[in-house]
Amino acid sequence: MGEADDGSKSKRVVFVTVGTTCFDSLVRAVDTQEVREALFKKGYTHLVIQMGRGSYIPTKSTGEDGSLSVDYFTFSSSIAEFLKSASLVISHAGSGSIFETLRLRKPLTVVVNEDLMDNHQSELAEELAERKHLFCARPQTLYETISAMDLILL
Amino acid sequence: PKIHKVFGMENRDGSFFSDMGCINASILLIIGASTLIVIRIFYIIYRSSKPLYSTPPGPLSTLIVLGSGGHTAEMLNLLAVMQMERFKPRYYIAAATDNMSLQKARALEDSLMQKSEVGLVGTSHFMQIYRSREVGQSYITSVGTTLIALTHALWLMIKIRPQVILCNGPGTCIPLCVIAFFFKAFGIRWSSIFYVESIARVRRLSLSGLLLYKLRMADQLFVQWPQLKSKYPRANYVGAEKVGNFLHHDLTNFQPM
């Protein structure tokens, strides 16, 4: 899978999307210090979070102090643009988000929402992870997945 | 008195026998009727699972049941690759609480209209249906709302009487499919039910898919993963990217009765 970025070598964006759902545990997980640092260590410079209907507000950061720049919004009509400009996508397990990202041939880590009642969403993510199309994680294992992530495997 | 007794006996026996005759007749009637119904249902199930006829038919009135979110997106992707001029008029149904799905269907219809010619104008209708139970609703009130939803579904089905029903879950499609099945049984309208299981279902069918499969109500049930095909052998396996083509092939070779 190609490691595309938006032209400038320096800016590498991680785009987090929860779609139309409320998935606070994912937003909280990417907002932790350890995940931010892990992403920064991997060479990503920007973290953009689409947080949907969630109520947990991540901490913004300009990234001027030589760390990851963090920004967020709730909804946008141009999710496709964010996906296109991303170097890595971290997404909820909705089939729409998964296939849209894979179609753009972007590296993808899917985080399964364990709070959902009838959780069939994990089926698709796990199957596609087995077929090496993406990485599959849970909110509490996101840090391990990102640290161990080797995009060449996709 | 002896004779009397005998006559009495006879009388009683007589009425007993005529009672028996009456009961026998009604039992026979019930058995006959239920046999006919059973035969009719088996015939419908048998006929439904048969490969479809190949005479080129005219346009088919089509009911498209939109779920919500991912389901709607999958359905509209499917429609986008089908030859829509064969399926008209098209009736889109979405849950009354779902504002997005019909908007998206309208957008698809608009783009179809722009892309092509006169043949498609005025062939699409958009409707909403009550859901039997909203998420989080209590079970006591849901008895009432289920009845309302069923009546509403019946009303819509009487109005539409579609020849083809396309659905991919979730539960909104079940009352409509059940009513369609009864329409078949009573000879009101023969509609073919095509169910496409969501691509998100890899190992287990959804509840809607499972119901239609077990009750043999769907004429064709498509699954998009090989694991499902091996678990539910009567399903049609089509790789995700090909569902549109296969469905289209089946539908174009479809001759309504």
Image (cartoon, grey):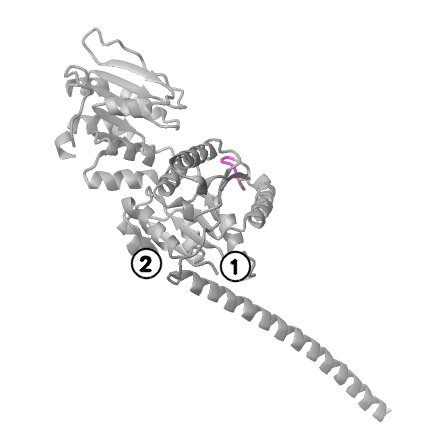
Q: The residue tagged with tag 1: helix, strand or loop?
A: helix
Q: Name the chain letter of the residue that bears numbered label 2.
A: B
The type of residue carrying mark 1 is: Lys
Q: Residue at x 69, y 79 (%)?
A: B21
Q: Earlier in the sequence, mark 2 or mark 1?
A: 1
Residue A3, image x and y in percent?
16, 26
Tell me the residue that label 1 is attached to.
B184
Asked whether the viewer can see residue B224, the reply is no
Residue B157's disc is none
Q: Viewer-proximal residue, B46 or B80? A: B80
* Above or below: residue B104 compared with residue A75: below
Residue at 32% across / 43% down in the picture? B199
Tell me, yes or no, if residue B162 can be seen here. yes
Q: Residue furthest left?
A: A152
Give the quarter of the image for residue B101.
top left
Residue located at (87% from left, 91% from top): B1
| Majority secondary structure of magenta residues | loop
Q: Find residue B233 and name its label.
A: 2
Q: Residue at x 32, y 30 (%)?
A: A92
